[in-house]
Image (tube, rainbow, N blue to C red):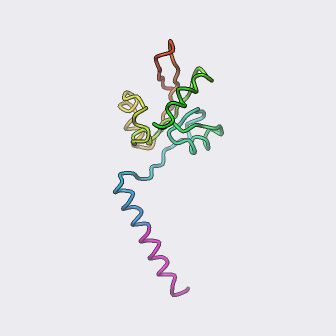
Amino acid sequence: MRKDYGLYLCAILCLLVLASTWSNYRGYSLRLSDWSNVDYADWATNNPVAEYYTGNPVKLFRNNTYGDYINDFKRKDTLYVAIDYYALLPVAINIIPLEILAVDGALFEKGGVSVWRTYIVEDTVLVWERK
């Protein structure tokens, strides 16, 4: 074993500690949710993982894409939205109905995912139903 191996190991450990400290300082941390029960979604708060599990293209459901989501109803009458822990973060919390956050907030904290069927009634009312 080379002499410098211990120095590299120490440097990597220091970087991990600094990254962890920075992550906690900003209030964000890595959360892994169980997406294995999600078989279909049009939109998701974590679209790369949703695409992996569904095998279909999934659009990112965040505050800055909400207009695209509403415009997507011109193409389809029903859209499925998969929601995980990211719904509790500032990037998506403004567009998730408070009722869903109240009911599924603990589920999201524990790494769960819920899927919701959404559609518009009478061109004005957005309805959310659990799939």
Query: At 54% from the left edge and 39% from the top edge, which residue is drawn?
Result: 60
Q: Position of residue 31 (x, y in %)?
A: 45, 49
Q: Which region is colored magenta? A: 1-15
Q: Is residue 121 above or below residue 11?
A: above
- What is the quadrant of residue 80 in the picture? top right
- In this view, the residue in front, 77 or 103, is 77
Locate residue 107, reporting x and y percent.
41, 38
- Magenta span: predominant SS is helix
Q: Which residue is drawn at the image coordinates 65% and 37% (left, top)?
A: 56
Residue shown at the point (48%, 37%) measured from the top left: 64
Residue 17 in magenta? Answer: no
Q: Nearer the viewer, residue 46 or 62?
A: 62
Residue at x 57%, y 23% (from the top left corner): 73
Q: Farthest right residue?
A: 55
Q: Give the total number of marks visible in the rendering.
A: 0
Q: Quadrant of residue 13?
A: bottom left
- The quarter of the rendered structure image containing the N terminus is bottom right
- Counting from the top left corner in percent of width and height, residue 28 is at 39, 51
Q: Give yes or no for residue 8 being in the magenta stretch.
A: yes
Tell me if residue 7 comes above or below residue 52 in the rendering: below
Q: Which residue is the extreme one toward the bottom?
A: 3
Residue 51 x %, y %: 61, 41
As displayed, is residue 30 above or below residue 103? below
